[in-house]
Amino acid sequence: MNTHPRPGARPAPPAEPGVDHDRIRRAVREILAAVGEDPDREGLLETPDRVARMYAEVFGGLHTDPAVHLAKTFTQKHDEMVLVKDIEFASCCEHHLLPFVGKAHIAYLPNGKIVGLSKLARVVDAVARRPQVQERMTEQVADLIMAHLKPRGVGVIVEASHTCMTVRGVRKPGAMTITSSMRGGFLDHPPTRAELMSLVFGRGG
């Protein structure tokens, strides 16, 4: 079986650390053949290469350290909650390798230092871009912020729609999964947690 790109196909991109494009291309050809397709028909000739590039992109978080985005902090007296809402992300469920997409809400109670707001979004991206489950992703974001900012509390809420339950299996379009991870003041002080929930979901949520 020919596993090499056809003449004139897009040249292979520079190899990302830890990503074997050729191995992915060979595997995709095997999958296409296994489901009864012809990987050599015109519409599929470049599919293995496209999938290899796609996997290198969507799993790029495997080869980055999310903590680097929290390395630079600023000394700032601020005793109240800092909340960044509606951080959109896309991840891939590790059980079926199907996407789940949604948004994360991150709040923390500073303890003398703050971080650039965009860095919180970068942490979400780095944690999301790998085979994931939503529960672990939520915990990982909370743990990273708690460990590197050392705030008085962290609250992370993630809302997502999972294609592994909307396009297959139970097939329930519109179903949303919500997970939360609370640390410090958000865990120990119910009024603070209630304030976060109100800010995220509204007083009727």
Image: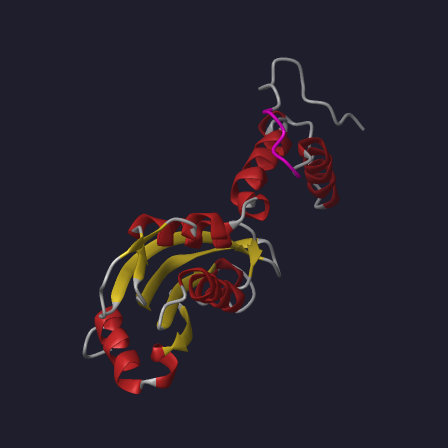
Q: Is residue 50 above or below residue 192?
A: above
Residue 6 % position (x, y): 67, 18
Quarter assignment of residue 195: bottom left
Q: Is residue 36 above or below residue 166?
A: above
Taking the spot 59% from the left edge, 54% from the top edge, the residue there is 97
* Location of the N terminus (image quadrant): top right
Span shown in magenta: 13-18
Q: Name the residue located 36 percent from the left edge and 61 percent from the top edge.
A: 104
Asked whether residue 16 is drawn in magenta, I would say: yes
What residue do we see at 57% from left, 33% from top? 53
Residue 154 highlighted magenta (yes or no): no
User: Who is closer to the viewer here, 75 or 8?
Assistant: 75
* Residue 158 percent location from the top left of the image: 39, 65
Furthest toward the left, the residue is 203
Left or right, 76 with respect to 64, comes to left
What's the magenta bit mostly, secondary-structure-wise?
Answer: loop
Report the coloring of the rendering.
Answer: secondary structure
Front one among 136 and 72: 72
The quarter of the picture where the C terminus appears is bottom left
- Along the line of sight, the residue nearer the viewer: 166 or 114: 114
In the rendering, at what x and y percent does residue 141 appear? 45, 62
Task: Examine the image and state in which quarter residue 40 appears.
Answer: top right
